[in-house]
Every structure is written in structure tokens, then in C-alpha cells.
Image (cartoon, rainbow, N blue to C red):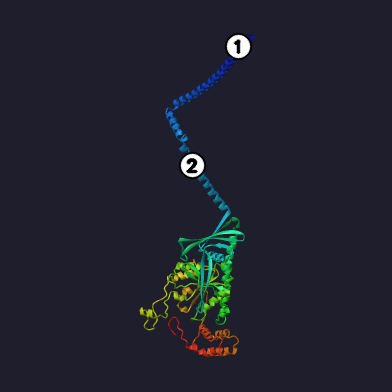
Amino acid sequence: MSDHSNPTPNTDNNANNRSGSCNDNVSINTANTAVSETDKGEINLVDTLLAANSSSNDSPVTLKGQLKELIRQSMVDNPYFAAGGGLMILGSGLALARTGMIRLSRLLYKQMIVDLEIQSKDKSYSWFLTWMGRYPYRVSKHLSVRTNYIQHDNGSISTKFSLVPGIGNHWLFYKGAIISIKRERSGRMLDIVNSSPYETVKLTTLYKDRYIFNEILEEAKTIAMKSNEGKTVIYTSFGPEWRKFGQPKAKRALPSVVLDQGIKEMILEDVKDFMRNGGWYSDRGIPYRRGYLLYGPPGSGKTSFIQALAGELDYNICILNLSEQNLTDDRLNHLMNNMPERSILLLEDIDAAFNSRKTTIGQNQAKNGILNTTSGFPTRSIYNTSVTFSGLLNALDGVTSSEETITFMTTNHPEKLDPAIMRPGRVDFKVFIGNATPYQAEKMFMKFYPGETDTCKKFVDRFRSLVVPVSTAQLQGLFIMNKDKPLDALENITTLIETQQYDYNGST
């Protein structure tokens, strides 16, 4: 019995313990509940105060708050809108990144890349294309052809083809630098100078290699100058510019032109004196230009001497036809003020620009009823020009006239020239170049037949006995017909008398 009486207190104790534990838990939960209720009360109190404050300050805020809550629920809690907003943000970010990359690339391009543009109206344009066509280290997928067409004096024709970079993109490797070349042609713009499509060539390379542009242009210029070395370039007017006429001609040696004794040396010395005294003109305020008039009968060697003089001075020749129908005062002035460097201006037959000149005509002109029934030659002027006489005078010696100019004028009829054009400043040096003299006959005979001294003396004696004037052109024709045959030339000298030579007046 005693064994079974002891567990009872233990059970009671356990029960008490469990009862104590439960009481503790209830106390803890009650405490937590009390805390939560307290927090909720404080929160509700704060919300009530804020709502009351808002209500007291602005009664419509409640409606505004409701609208905000509605918008918030529509935007934040709506998954479709959240997805669209993400895409919008992503797109905006990419757009900003693209703009930043473009601006950065432009900045780097400006800092690291350099361009050179050559326009078709610039002289170096054709120089560069010729140089690039010959340069071996290039990559060109587009080519164009240039054809040099030459017709020789004997009638034969020779052509030469050269391939140059065409329209498009090209690459060039020059002294370790890579150059991108783009040749473009405008489909809408025309070059008003030559009425051809406007073109440009653009060279692009790294900024550190920019110095090579000057080297390339210098090389291109050297090649262009070498092609004209030892030759005389003839220019003619085309629109408002000067253009090369045909291929450059071999320089004519000054001794090959035989003028009367002392004339050639006198003109050459005067031109050289003018060329080396530019400072003298400038110090005295005198326009630095000089005009020469060579007058005399046809075939006396006026133009030939000018060509030989240009070769002696290493000058080119610009031929201006005052009888050109489209030539105006303004264009004449522009051309004379924009001549190529180191060029002689040649105005041939200056008297023909403002006077009617007679010439032979064919049957078609006779049918048009313009023949003079007495002489059989036309009486209508065939020289029409828009240049006025005052325009020519102002171009030669006016306010807008050019400086550092050497002008040669030729005429067969000096008596037809107005005195105004003959005054100093326009014509400073007048030289008569007439028909052949015994001195010229001797010099020309020895030039064609070297060593034939005795035959030359006989030829000169017979030449003196001729009763008609003979031009140097006639003498040259006789020697060409009897080349390497001095005795035949001597025997046929009388044919010079029988040769009929017509001047511009139609007389024999």
C-alpha cells in the first residue's frame, strides 16, 4: 500500500507543472496580443489624426486620395501594365545608349580621322586621278578609261588608253598609311565651267597620317609637270575658262625661225628685260604688263616666232579669238585676268575683230546672193563678235586689266587699227616683220642644206633678181618640195614668181 500511495503526489505535481506551463503560455500570448492591440491602436490613432488634419485643411483631398489609390492599384497591381513599363524603360535605355554611341563615334571621328576633298573644278583633280591610275598599291573595283587621241601631221592617228579610278570606293596603301578614297558624281549638279557632271574625290585616313596628303599632291603635280616638260602647252578659251588645245607641242627652237637681221634678238632682249624688272614697275606705280604688236604680210613668220619665243622662255601660249561669237566684254576681262601661270597671251589678227574681212567662198555662199559681182568675193562680214572696242581697250589697259601679262598681237593690216589701241600701255613695242630678205634666204638655205655654200651664193643671187616679193613661207615650201636636193631648189626658184598668193582682200 505504501508503494502505491507515493505516485499520487507526483501526478498532482506534474499536473501542476503543466498547469503552470499553460498559464505561462497564456500570459505570453496575452502579452503579445496586448502589444499588437497597442500598436494597432497607435496606428489607428495616427491615421485618424492625419485624416482629421487633412479633412480640416482641405476637404477634397479625400477624393484625391481615392483617385491616387485607384491609379496605384491600376498601375502597380496590373501585371500587363508592369510588363509594358519595363519594355518602355528598356527601349528608352537602348535609345539613349544609341545616341551616346553616335555622339561618341562622331567625337572619335573628329579627333582621329581627317578628310581631304578635291573638287573637279580644281586643277589637282585630274592630276590626282592620273597619279592614282599609275600607283600600284591600290584596290579599285571601279575603273574608268581616258583616251588620248592624237592625229599626226601625216594624217595617221594614235591612241593611248589609261585606266583611272571610277565612281565608287577605293583603297590605297601609301607609306604605311591606309587611305579610303571615294569618288562621287552628282546627278543633279553640273560644273558650269565645262558643263560636265560635278565630281569630287574624298580621301580619308587617320589624323596622325594627315601629312601624306601634301606628299601625294606634290607627286601628282610632278608627274603632270613632267608630261609637259620640254613642250609648249597651247590653251584656248572655252566658256569662262582656259582649256588645253590638243596635246602639248614640242618646243620650237628659236634659231629655227629666221627673221630679218637683229629683229629676233631685239624682241627677245626686250621681253627678258621686262621679266626681270617687276620691282622697277612696282616702285614707280606702273602697271606691270607689256604689249607687243607684230605686223606685216601673211606668211612672214609672226606666229611661228611667238611659238619659238614661248619655248625659249619656257612659257605656254593662250590663244584668244576676238571674233568668237559668244565672247563678251565681261568674259574677255575674266579670261585675261585668269590666265594660266607663265603664259603669253596671243591675239591673232587683231584688226579682224571689228572690221569686215573678205575671203574666198564656195558655191553655196554664191547661191545665197552675197557675192560682189565685180570682185567675186563676199561683201558680208563673216566676223561677228559681242566684244566692244571699248571692252577690248579696258581689258588691255583698264582698271580691271590683269598684271604680269605679256601680250602679243598680230595683224596683216596695221592701217586698219584704231589709234587708241596703238598707244603705249596697250602696245608698247611695234615690230614690222616683212617678206623674205636676201639675209633670210641665205640663212634658210643653209639650214635646209648644210655645207652647200657655193650653191647658196647662187641661190641668193637669183633670189635678188626676183621681181615679186616672196614670203618666208614660200621659201620654206620650196625647200620642203626639194629636200636634200639643193640644185633642184636652185633651178626651181622661178616657180616662186608663178605662185599666186591671195591676201585677205582677194588680190593676187
3 or 347: which is nearer to us? 3
Q: Could you tell me residue 423's position as x and y percent?
A: 49, 73
**In the picture, which quadrant includes the N terminus?**
top right
Residue 190 vertical placement versus 472 (above, below): above
**In the picture, which quadrant includes the C terminus?**
bottom left
Q: Quadrant of residue 438?
A: bottom right
Amino acid at pointer 1: Thr
Q: Residue at x 58, y 52 (%)?
A: 111
* Mark 2 burial class by Cα count in 10 Å: few <14, some 14-19, many 20+: few
Q: Could you tell me residue 121's position as x and y percent?
A: 50, 64
Q: Which residue is mark 2?
A: 87
Q: Could you tell me residue 65's position as x and y percent?
A: 44, 30
Q: Could you tell me residue 488's position as x and y percent?
A: 54, 89
Q: Which residue is mark 1?
A: 8
Amino acid at pointer 2: Leu
Under circle 2, the secondary element is helix
* Mark 1 burial class by Cα count in 10 Å: few <14, some 14-19, many 20+: few
Residue 64 vertical placement versus 122 (above, below): above
Under circle 1, the secondary element is helix
Furthest-right residue in view? 2
Furthest-top residue in view? 1
116 or 291: which is nearer to us? 116
Q: Is residue 465 visible?
A: no
| Pointer 1 or 2: first along the chain | 1
